[in-house]
Amino acid sequence: MSVDGHATVVALDAARAVFRKHIEVNQGRVIDMAGDSVLAVFETAIGAVSAALAVQQSLCELTNAQPEDRRLCFRIGVHLGDIIEKADGTVYGDGVNIAARLQALAEPGGTIVSESVRTAVRTKVTVAFEDQGEQPVKNIAEPVRAFRVRVDGAAHTATAAAKVSGHGGPNVPSVAVLPFQNMSGDADQEYFSDGITEDLITDLSKLPGLVVIARNSTFTYKGRPVDVRRIGREFDVSHVLEGSVRRAGGRVRITAQLVEAANGRHVWADRYDRNVEDVFAIQDEIAQKIVTALDVRLLRGEQAAGWRKSLRRADALDAYYRGLDLFNRVSREANDEALHCFEQVIDLEPQSPLGYLGTAWTHLSAFRYGWSESPPDSFKRAAELAGRSLELDEGCADAHALLGYYHLLQGAHDSAIAAGERAVALNPNHADNAANLACSYAVSDRPADAIPLLERAIRLSPIYPSWYLNILGFANIRAERYKEAESALKLALQRDPADTRCRMLLAWAYHSRDRTDEARREAREILRQEPAFRLESVAPQLAIIKDRALVASYFDALRELGLE
């Protein structure tokens, strides 16, 4: 400023424009641009890191021709944590404070991220994270573990390029199926378009030559504006499938288009005007065209298995889609209504496995959430119905997965693993089934096998539930990979600081590395949150662990830390 104030202001305005552009493209919001600082919040960790990488690259290109002493270089810090947002749009909290402190640790033109960010994005960006250790942070009680972002072996600075990772490995196509829009002009028909979307995800997920993002992740875009480039970055996919459904009486019109995520180019698009009874045939055609367009390699017999359908009647299909919609609402009332819908499917199409499987799901939910007057009976009934669906179609992946869960809770670990492995073999892209099998591995005697399965589940469902991280933490502890366990468990606690079981595992991980002070700190936090806490209260939840000596050792460690 002292040499040339006007030129500096112009350069600063240009830099601000770069920040604003990449922040907005990556699902971010600029909160403040006071002086030479920028504060922004993002919907996802990958969005924040992608923006940081893109900003540094763009600033490098913008200032490359300038003398070194005339270049504006920015430090960037990225943290994943809670914030408090006021009505006027300003934000406060430890999340902001830690990000600000991290940027101070970065070198000019460099980027520093916290451990929570590194854990969230490390499988989604082709950069390295150089551990800077735990850093004392002003006004924050606990040290923050920081990582320097490095590209191509060099620190990521304004001279290093930003590169986002490939899509599931070399030459492996990947797709996110977005919720098809309901164009019927009747909100009550929403379940029908959602059901078609879910069936397409299920069909495509069965193909081992294709990576398909889970429903729980893609349905977060339901009713939101679509930017396929942003979706490609967030879910790390090569292609996006989107479409619409218009239903009128006994006729249905379905449009679908497959788009390259990197550039928005349309690979294929089509429109289908058919009778409602032909919906499954339309889904088959869409899936086949995607397979052809993406050059997915199919083994003999897989294509027939992937396209096979079992509902023939339009009213059965309608009842099934209504049941799916109600089941996904996860409430006692909706679950009861879903049960009636799936029972209607059984009445209309008794030779289809889908009605029995849907009914089994509702009984399982009644057991898990305490909605049943007799949970053991509901659980047994779920297993019986899953078995019936397998009698009709042995290739029903979700039925195998449900039976795997049943066997696990019965203490039959080998049977649980066999059923889980069959479910994953039949549908290699089902995130929850992979995570459930990983749980069976982790609580039996195969924790090392659980870790890559959980990492794959997280890849398939980028917006994944926290219980994935709890199992990942437990498996890493059992495999004596304590740093990895701590990273997963800390991330889970950032999502839910009141998760007692997660905090117990973190205390155990610290104790196993003789980090007694940190272990005792976690134990004290458990007692602060739950003054009446007793170890016996969590004992039933550990009944699925095969090695009872391990459980005893775990409890002994927690007692040493002050928990009783």
Image (tube, helix red, strand yellow):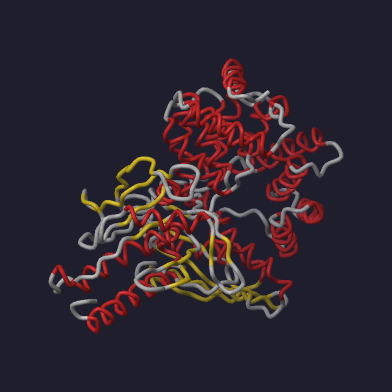
Q: Nearer the viewer, residue 222 or 519?
A: 519
Looking at this rendering, what residue extends furthest in the top direction?
549
Which residue does the image show at 48% across and 71% down from the upper left? 31
* Residue 396 visible to the viewer: no
Q: Which residue ends up furthest to the front in the rendered image? A: 2
| Residue at horizontal 68 percent and vertical 42 percent from the top | 389
Q: Is residue 378 visible?
A: yes
Image quadrant holding the N terminus, namely: bottom left
Quarter of the image holding residue 276? bottom right
Above or below residue 332? Residue 524 is above
Q: Position of residue 480 (x, y in %)?
A: 43, 26
User: Horizontally, is 547 left or right of 260 in the view?
Assistant: right
Badge count: 0
x, y percent for residue 377: 82, 34
- Quarter in which the C terminus is drawn: top right
Q: Position of residue 32 (x, y in %)?
A: 45, 72
* Residue 44, position as x, y percentages in the image: 48, 59
Q: Residue furthest bottom?
A: 6
Where on the picture, by quarter, is residue 423? top right
Q: Is residue 393 left or right of residue 39?
A: right
Q: Is residue 446 left or right of residue 132?
A: right
Q: Nearer the viewer, residue 102 or 4?
A: 4
In-front residue for pair 80/528 = 528
